[in-house]
Image (cartoon, rainbow, N blue to C red):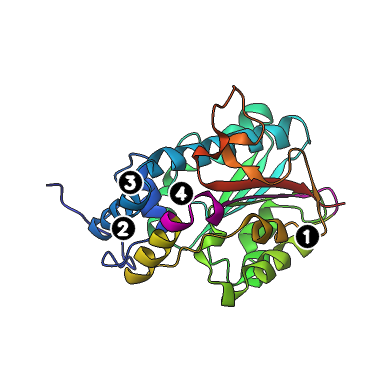
Amino acid sequence: MREEVAPPGVDTSVAHSARMYDWWLGGKDNFAADRAMGEAFIQAIPTIKTMAKENRRFLGRAVRHLVAEAGIRQFLDIGTGIPTRPNLHEEAQEIAPETRVVYVDNDPIVLVHARALMISSEQGRSEYIHADLRDPARILNDPALLATLDLNQPVALMMIAVLMLLKTEEDPWAHTRALMDALPSGSYLVVTHPGREFDEEAMEMIRSSAERGGMTVIPRTKAEVERFFDGWELIEPGVVPVMGWRPEEQVEDPAAAFYWAGVARKR
């Protein structure tokens, strides 16, 4: 059995979404509580590891579209997770080396790996902020963000499988809107979110398992996910199952991964 050593500030007794995803994706930066929670999710949805990989594949497709077709050169990635190659800046800078990326997460383990692995191209830049989605003002006023991104120019706000971590009473729509309102016209919002309608019983099992383990995971309906985009122009094909958003090859069953996904542009 491998020795598990955590960086300072990491509570290994409580599962964390970034480390749980790391385990699902085959990484080694996770602890017993993360694996136990991840296994509980597998009991509810046996294919959840594959779903996590499909979520990452969507991220790549969305980034490539935004850089190659929409001309985006700045990204703000909330809920980054533990670096899993290819990372967002690698995908973007392969097309446009001058791309700038700011990553945000609240797990100290992500901080350790971000500093070691999120190395930008010479022409571009990547930075990491240790902060929480619940405090958008702190994110927007962080010196590293202000030194990296020009908020007078379009920015792609990436919120990949992170909004599920806020309870409804915490109003994730308001926190998202605070970030959106700080961005200029021509910016984009990219969201993936577990969808309740795909399998109501399984999603309730995940919600309750997470709650028992001291973690929040709230699946939401398609209509609730669409609310995050209010006032912005959804690009085709709108809010759809994650595997059905501009797939690069034919997909037999787009609803096989239980995430909603969408990309919208600020008019």
Magenta residues span 185-202
Q: Residue furthest bottom?
A: 169
Q: What residue would you read off at disc 3?
A: 23
According to the picture, the residue beneath numbered tag 1 turns out to be 230
Q: Earlier in the sequence, mark 4 or mark 2?
A: 2
Say which of marks 3 and 2 sits in front: 2
Q: Which mark is residue 114?
A: 4
Mark 1 vs mark 4, CA separation in Å: 32 Å
Q: Are marks 1 and 3 in contact (CB under 8 Å)?
A: no
Q: Amino acid at mark 4?
A: Ala
Tell me, yes or no, whether the highlighted magenta stretch contains residue 200: yes
Question: Where residue 163 appears, x then y in whole percent?
Answer: 57, 61
Q: Is residue 14 visible?
A: yes
Q: Secondary structure at mark 4?
A: helix
Q: Is residue 119 visible?
A: no
**Amino acid found under the numbered disc labelled 3:** Trp
Residue 181 is one of the magenta-drawn residues: no
Splitting the image into 4 quarters, where does residue 214 fall?
A: bottom left
Which is in the foreground here, disc 4 or disc 3? 3
| Earlier residue among tags 3 and 2 | 3
Say few, some or many: other residues with alpha carbon within 10 Å of mark 3 (under 14 / 14 to 19 / 20 or more). some
Counting residues from the N terminus, which is met first, the one under dot 1 or under dot 3? 3
**Residue at coordinates 65% horizontally, 69% vertically from top-left?**
175
What is the C-alpha distance between the residues marked 2 and 1? 33 Å
